Image (spheres, helix red, strand yellow):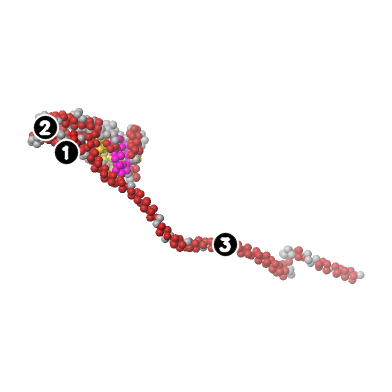
Amino acid sequence: MVAAIVYFVTKKAPPPEIAAPPEPKKLPEKAKQPAGKPAEKPADRPRVQKKPPAEEEPPAKAKEPAPREEPPAATPFPVEVPAVPPPSARAVPPEPAVAEAPPVAATVVEAPAEKPAPARPARETTPPGARKRDVEGLRKGLTKVREREGFFGRLKALFAGKKEIDPNVVEQIEEVLLTSDVGVKTTELLLDEIRSALSRNELADTDKVWDALREHAKRILRVGAGGGLSLKTQPTVVMVVGVNGVGKTTTIGKLATQLKAEGRTVVLAAGDTFRAAAVQQLNVWGKRVGCEVVRGKDGANPGAVIFDAIQKAKETGADVVLADTAGRLHTKTNLMEELARVARTMNKAMEGAPHETLLVLDATNGQNAMQQAALFKEALPITGIVLTKLDGTAKGGVILGICAEHGLPVRYVGIGERAEDLREFEPDEFVEAMLGRPSGTEDAAA
């Protein structure tokens, strides 16, 4: 019995061995088996695992070429650059063959060259024409002087229809000259020469006396003839002074118009800071002419305004600075001293400034204009006279007195409201227009 039991016990032992198949379920527990005999089985298993990793290796290799592709990505750039120029270089020669560049350069250069071309001949042709028109224009502007009651009309009446010289002709000429604002000194200078010529029997008839009178007048005016402005420096600073109401601001506007027409750049300085209308008037001229206007606040220091204008002209490369100043009575010494301070301030802004100091005189003021010239000359180094409103007076002899007694050059004369009516003073043409020609030929010329 015992043997039978043992047999059956031993017989049932194999069934548990049949449970070996479930052992593969324990395969995932690799941690326990690698320490035992089944070390060979993991060798078999890696073979099975080698197949999937073999499949996984290609993606890994695919990832590896990605970083390797980055360096080639950098290399193509230099490779492409040399590759591109040779074909483009070949393409470039045919493009210049089209000659697109030359026409562009030609248009840019020729366009500006064509503009100055017409401007130059215009400047060359205007002076002679202007000279021809000066006498006729002056005669029209000096209409009141040439009227019967004017300076020229009264002198002509002394000689009209007469050939023989009247013994009292010298006294008659003296009366006309004195009442025409010529001045005592200038009148005596003219008459002394006529008396000496008569005493030498050099004047046979009234025509000779008339010619002598005209020649003596020309000689006086030539001494003070200054022509236009002297523009030797850049910028040339011009200071314009005078009493109230003589036309300083208007004169500046007309000068700016003429300078602009000559192709010069002008800066206007509104130095008359005490009269708001003067600043506004200068602004109007600036817009009309196309000039920059430098101004300050009402009541500002005129020297500071003009100083800024000079600095502006130096920065922009302007040719001329025209500086307006407040009108002042020539009898007020403190106001005249203020002008001298303004002139010193201008010299600080630019050495040598002002290069021109123009005194504007009203021809209708007569002998008062002579006094103004004397006092302004004491306060400032006057370089020229602008005689305005000659078209509004029947006398006109003040210009002879200014030149003879003060030796100041007359630069411009004003005979009208238009910009072109401010004319450069030319002695011979002025005398021709004011005193005419000898009897018998003057009317024909007029």
Q: Could you tell me which secondary element the residue under label 1 belongs to?
A: helix
Q: Position of residue 151 (x, y in %)?
A: 19, 31
* Labels 1, 3: front one: 1
Q: Amino acid at mark 2?
A: Lys
Q: Residues within 10 Å of mark 2 (few under 14, many from 20)?
A: few
Q: Quadrant of the N terminus?
A: bottom right
Distance from Cα at disc 2 to Cα at disc 3: 124 Å
Q: Residue at x 31, y 48 (%)?
A: 117
Q: Could you tell me which secondary element the residue under label 2 belongs to?
A: loop
Disc 3 target residue: 67
From this view, report whether residue 316 is shown above or below residue 245: below
Front one among 433 and 58: 433
Q: Residue at x 20, y 32 (%)?
A: 397
**Over which residues does the magenta segment extend?**
250-271
Front one among 429 and 380: 429
Lateral position of residue 231 relative to residue 65, left or right: left
Q: Position of residue 359 (x, y in %)?
A: 25, 36
Q: Position of residue 56 (x, y in %)?
A: 65, 64
Magenta segment: does it hold 263?
Answer: yes
Disc 2 target residue: 163
Front one among 224 and 335: 224
* Labels 1, 2: front one: 2
Q: Amino acid at mark 3?
A: Pro
Q: Could you tell me which secondary element the residue under label 3 belongs to?
A: helix
